[in-house]
Image: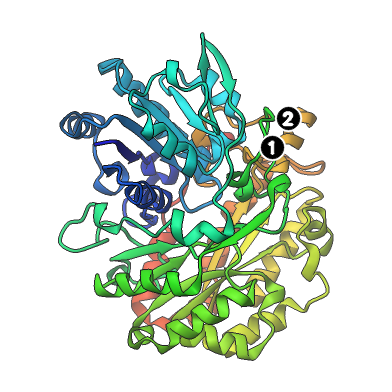
Amino acid sequence: MDVLFINSGNAKVVYQDLSKDYSAIEPPTWALLLAESCRSQKFKVGILDMNAENLSFEEASHRITKLKPRLICFVVYGQNVNAGTVGMSGAAAFSKFLKNNNSNLNIALIGSYAQSLPYKVLSDEESIDFIFTNEGVYSLWNILKLEKIDPNYLEHIKGIGWRKNGKVTLNPPEKLVPQERMDIDLPGYAWDLLPMKEKALDLYRAPMWHAEYDHAKRSPYAAIQTSLGCPFACSFCMINIINRDDNDPIGVAGNYSKMRFWSPEFIIKEFDKLDLMGVNTIRIVDEMFLLNKKYYQPLCELLSERPYSKSLRMWAYSRIDTITNSETLDLVRKAGIKWLCLGIESGNRNVRLEVSKGKFQDLDIRKVIQHVHDAGIEVLANYIFGLPGETQESMEETLNLSLELCTSGWNAYTAMPLPGSQLYKDALEKGYKLPKDYSGFSFHSYTTSPMPTDKLSAAEILKFRDQAYTTYHTAPNLLNRIKTTFGPIAVNNIKKMTEIGLKREILGD
C-alpha cells in the first residue's frame, strides 16, 4: 500500500460523558477526498478510522503492520471548526506510539492545526516526519511518486514542512486545486474504504437534533462537501486556512478567503451513490452552501428531481441574509434539506460587527427565522458567548433572543482563539492565557479555556454558556415545539441529554 490515511479521534476526551450516546461520529470527509484523489493517480490507498471503530493503539498498530503502507498520513480536520486542533491530541499520541514501536515508519500529517502553526507542530511533535502546509493534494501526489520516502528526497517537494538537519524547514507553497480541476483532481469520495458493521456508513451517527432527537434515525450517516472555503473573513473562524499560500509562522485564515466548487453534475453522482448505499441522513459540510446561486440552485433542482429526495434528511449552512426569498426556501425543501444551520452568533448588533459578521445587522432576525419555519424547514441556530466586546448584559441578550426564536436546534459555544483564526493571533498579542493542551480548544472538554473579554473572565463566560445550555433545553416553549414537531420520544431524549453535565477545570469541577 502506498498511503494509509488515519482518523485517530479522541471523542471521550473531547465530549466527556456525551461521547457515549449523544455526540456525533462524523465520517472523515477529507480522508475520503484525499484517498479518492490518490486512487485517481493509481496509488494504492486505505483508510483506518480509529474513531469509528473505537480501536486501541495496539489494535490500530496491528492493522498497520499487516497493511505495510509506504506512508502513514494522519488527516486531522473534523467537521467542527475546532476539530483540527482538538484532533491533534489523538494524532500526536498515536504517532508517538507508532514511532516508539517502529522508528522506520514514514509519518505525515495534514490538517488545519499544522497549516496554522507549521513551525510549532514540527517543533513540538518529533514523531511527525513532515506536514502539508495547505490542502496538500498535489504535494501528496508528488511525495508518493518518490521511489523512496525519506528526508533526503524532500528538498524539492512544494507545500510541505519538514526537518532539514534537525531544523524545521518549510518548502515553497504548492498550488491549490484550481476551480477548473475540482471534478478531476478531487474526484469524489472513497466511500468503499470506510469501516462498517453490517452496511455502509452504519458506524457513523448524526447529531441528535439532525436526527430529530431520535437515536434510530442517526445511522447510517454521511457528510459531503459541494464547495471548499468561504469568501468571508470572520475573526473567530479558521476554515480558510486550508487555502494557505504563504509560509508565515502564524497563519490567519482571513488572509486566504476564497471559495471553489465542484460542478452540480458531479456532486449529484455522489448523492446517487449514497442513495444506493441506503444513506438518507446527510450533512452538507460547506460553510456557505446557500451563497452562490450558480452552484446551489442547479444542484437543488437535480436533487428535487430524484425520487429519493422525499426520504432525505439533510442539513446545510447558510447566512441569515441569503434566505429571505421564498422561492429559494421552497427549492431547498424540495431538494431534501430539512434543516438549515444559521450563524446568528450574538443577539447584540455591536458584538456581531466586532467580529466582521455584521452584514445582516439590519435584518429582522425574528422574521427570517419565521420565514424559514413557514417553509417547513427546521433551524439549528449557532451562538457564540464571549466574542470581543461581550458583557454580561449582551450574553443575556443573546440567550433571551434564542429563547424567543425557539429553534428546534441550538448550539452555543464560547469564543475560542482557534489556531488559524484572527482571535488566536489577537490572544497572543494581548497575552491571554491559551488552553494548556490540544483538547483544551474543544468547546466541550474538561480542560477547555475560552478567551476572556475586557469585561468578563473565561470562567464567567464558560459558566454562562453551560447554564444557558440547560436553560434552553429545559424551556417549556422548546419542549412543546419538539413534542408537536417530532413527538414524545424526542422530548424524552432531550431531557436525558440535558441531564449529562460537562465537568470544567476552570470552574473547579
Compared with 488, 225 (above or below) is above
Residue 305 drawn at (x, y percent): 41, 89
In this figure, which residue is indicated by the disc labeled 1?
A: 424
Residue flagged by tag 1: what amino acid is it?
Tyr
Q: CA distance from mark 2 to mark 1?
A: 6 Å
Tell me which residue sits at (28%, 36%) in the image.
2
Please tell me whether mark 1 sits on a helix, a strand or a loop. Answer: helix
Q: Is residue 349 left or right of residue 396?
A: right
Q: Quadrant of residue 171?
A: top right
Quadrant containing the N terminus is: top left
Compared with 494, 9 (above or below) is above
**Residue contact at pointers 2 and 1, CB within 8 angstroms:** yes
Compared with 368, 161 (above or below) is above
In this figure, which residue is indicated by the disc labeled 2?
A: 428
The answer to whether residue 473 shows anywhere in this view is yes
The residue sitting at the top extreme is 165
Tell me which residue sits at (40%, 60%) in the image.
497
Tell me which residue sits at (17%, 30%) in the image.
62
Residue flagged by tag 2: what amino acid is it?
Leu
Please tell me whether mark 2 sits on a helix, a strand or a loop. Answer: helix
